[in-house]
Amino acid sequence: MPSIRLAAAAGAIVLAGALAGCGSDAEDDADLGGSWTATLSTTSAWAAVYPNGHGTANLTSDDGTRVQLTVSGLGDSVEYTAHVHAGECDDNPPGGAHWLADPNGEDATGNIIELTLTTSATGTGETEVSSDLVLDDRAESVVVHAPDAVTEAAGLDDNRVLCGDLED
């Protein structure tokens, strides 16, 4: 009889260890926070329209995220939007999809980091935004989007004007 009790106890220990390992999945635990910079350049679709377009994005993320964005060489007095994206700039389309705080949630305000900026008469602009969202290692790039009217006037289908990959 003692060997049956010993076997049952050993089985319980093995089962408890296996169940404890099920409580966390390292692949689901994305690294949160950090600091990044991105050097933005004109995407190939917009190279003929804004050949001198460029910019810089500085991001810090811990209890929330702060993004500072500067651009130049773009259209004068135009309101652009920018987002953190989940793909790299050499993806098609550049930057891939928007980075989502909740990857299973909607691509909408409250689940994305979005900036707006209006360029000056010389095509330069800057903005800063703070968000309660905390970036993780799925954040790959920053993309500046042209408004629909500007995209249509340029005869283009892609509104992604500038893109820059995030670097530590």
Image: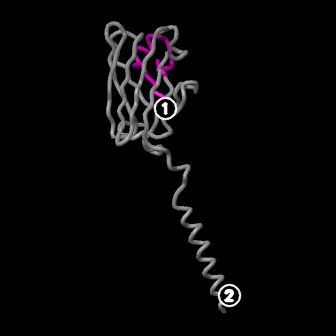
Residue type beneath disc 2: Ser
Question: Crowding at label 1, few (<14), some or many (≥20) Cα neighbours within 10 Å?
Answer: few
According to the picture, the residue beneath numbered tag 2 turns out to be 3
Which one is in front, 29 or 122?
29
Residue 32 is marked as none
Which one is in front, 110 or 14?
14
* Residue 165 seen anywhere in this rendered image of the structure: yes
For the N terminus, the image quarter is: bottom right
Q: Is residue 103 left or right of residue 63?
A: right
According to the picture, the residue beneath numbered tag 1 turns out to be 168
Residue at image location 32% in from the left, 17% down from the top: 118
* Residue 49 seen anywhere in this rendered image of the structure: no
Indicate yes or no whether the magenta region holds residue 158.
yes
Which one is in front, 69 or 112?
69
Residue type beneath disc 1: Asp
Tell me the CA gap for discs 1 and 2.
57 Å
The segment highlighted magenta reads 141-163
Residue at image location 32% in from the left, 23% down from the top: 127
Q: Residue furthest bottom?
A: 1
